[in-house]
Image (cartoon, rainbow, N blue to C red):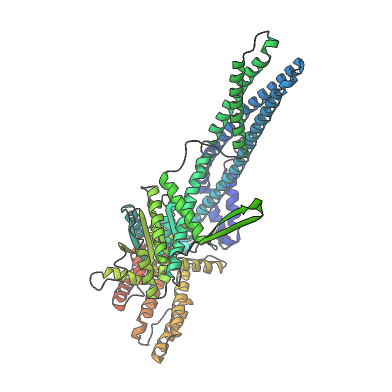
Amino acid sequence: MSIGFSPPDINKVRGEYVKLAKSSHYQHYDSFRQRIDAGMEILMPGIVEDLNAFHGSLASELTDYQSIHRSARKNSRSLAIVTALALILTVVSGAVIWSTGAASDQWLLLLVTISFAVAAAVTSAFRARARSVALRIEAESKALEVQLERRTNASVKQAFTRVLNETLGPENMLPFPTVAPRLVELNTSAVVPSSTATFLKNFVEGHESSAIGIAGPRGSGKSTLMRGLTSDAEHIDRSVWLTAPVRYDSVDFVRRLYLEVAKKVDERNGGELRSLRRRRYSSVLIGRTIIGAILFTIGFALIFYDSYGGEIFSQPAFSATGVAGMILFTSGLLVVLLGAVASLTRRSYVFGGGVTGQQGYAAFLAREAITRLSFDRETNTKSKNVAKFLGGSLALEDENSVTLKDRALSHADLISELRKLLQAFAEEEDSKPVIIVIDELDKISLTTDLVDTVNDLKDLFHIEGVHFIVSVSTDALLSFEQRGLVARDAFDSSFDTIVPVRALSLDESLQVISARAEGFPPLVSAFCHAWSGGLPRELLRIARRCVEIQRSTKEAQPVELLVRTVIAEDIISLVEAAMRSTSTAAKRDYLHQVRLHARLLREGHVSTGSSVSIPKSLQSIANVAALGEGLITYFATSVRVGDAEWSTPERYREPLEASARAMALKGEPEEIRAEAFEKASAVLLSTHGT
């Protein structure tokens, strides 16, 4: 079987480029088409070279499948020889029995015929397996072809975006996607490593057990951080994820956690057992089948010699020979039959394998837990006594019946049984930790319920080999950081550490967006970072809005337009939300003035500043509005997209990082917030026009 797809050539790459350039997403760049074509022609040979290397790796992978197919066909041919041998034996024995008239020995013909049928069944099964492998190779070939097609599309799109950058740079414009469906929070999205993620991973791997709180505001990426740890290849099969309920019930919460742990243990152990059954399928089964066929052949020869040797060769027959032949014949037939059954049921009986005692114990506890938590069990025992007299005309009998029903597990019972299961699960593999993640704990509205939840979990903390990671509120972080200064509470007395989720750095924000949107300009990603404060949820929202603005236009737009549109819209939304809860006339006047200026900014007009004094309670809005106006001015006067501008220049880093730090603190108290906003505004002002 040959490779089902060929490496792409330059014509294939050129065709993909033409199709991409003519798509509706890029039609607004038609006026630059001639210059873009020339740039793409320069990059195409390099694209073809990279794709040929990628094709070579795919072809190597497909070659491995082909070797498996050749092995399967070789085994099938070996068994075909066994089947042919059985057929020859059937014909010969039938001819001899017919010629000698030994009707009483027709059982021998019957056994040989059965052996032929068994051998034929085994051969048929292995031929079916070979065909199945061939079909898998065909499917794999198509899948690899799809991978190559996607790689080709991605390479062409990346090169196209780069050429667009180089072409539009002198015009102070950047290429921009008009569709980006992955600019949302996705469980399947790649988790970008961050300093907080590295600290969390090192803490878990450096301790035998731990209780860790993950603290941060809504949208700061707590769930993503925990998902990144549990989705790691080393931890995914020993991690349990539970989302805390908004309304807390202590018994139900522990019951749900107990059931989730039991399901994970059962799933993991069941997978191991199935893996053991499949181990060394072909070699073990084929080897035993061939050995059985050899034993069967030798046994048949001995029986045949013992039964007919005296008549055909005029030699005396020995009963001992017949007994030995019968033993070998029966043994061989039994092994071949077992091989047939194993083949037809697609199972390999590997003797001597099994799970360890501790794995078996954990699996047993898990199955018991699943049954007990999912069903109400009831056991009914009956006994009946009968005594008869006078030939049965008089009888006395009594009957007893006892019904036992499992009682519902109490909270203390659930905690005790869950601890036992976690201990058994952790002891399966001492080198790998068990990670229990409790997400959305900060959503529990009542403080008393939140404290009760932590106290319930506290009874499960610090089991050797088990690590609990819990998302908590910023209040919990404050309580933990003030430990020893005030009275102890559930948080500072329960957790080993509470890890604050730090805002993303500029480089991390660029990675988050590029992982979800191909061709997204890094310079615009840098603006998204500055205005979002490095909060992942805000970062993705702002990036989506930039895409929507670009999609609504018919031609390429300057970066400054995206910046002022997004900032002005956000300031207007912030002001209108404050208007709904403002009662005094002074506050309303100020908010109306800020909204008017934001509308002017959105239309591209220069702001003249507000003549209304700022109420103290609205100082945070004033800080955000002032920083937003500063960013608009900065991008309009200082940011230039030069030739081959593929990354954010270092000269932009300081003002954008300062802005992001300020925006991350916009909800903090005045003393903390004011300093950050003043510094950011000063940095932006000092770099205007540079």
Q: Quadrant of residue 690?
A: bottom left
Instruction: Judge whether residue 459 can be spotted in this image.
Output: yes
Looking at this view, is 467 or 57 the one in front? 467
Looking at this view, is 273 or 125 the one in front? 273
In the image as oriented, which residue stretches furthest toward the top? 314
Residue at image x 42%, y 43%? 356
In the image as oriented, which residue stretches furthest toward the front? 390
Instruction: Judge whether residue 502 can be spotted in this image.
Output: no
| Depicted 145 relative to depicted 663: above or below | above
In the image as oriented, which residue stretches furthest toward the bottom? 585
Give percent across and percent down for residue 349: 54, 37
Give percent across and percent down for residue 314: 68, 8
| Depicted 45 relative to depicted 400: above or below | above
Residue at image x 47%, y 50%? 268
Give percent across and percent down for residue 16: 59, 51
Residue at image x 39%, y 47%? 429
Looking at this view, is 217 or 172 the one in front? 217
Q: Quadrant of residue 191?
A: bottom left
Q: Is residue 328 left or right of residue 452?
A: right
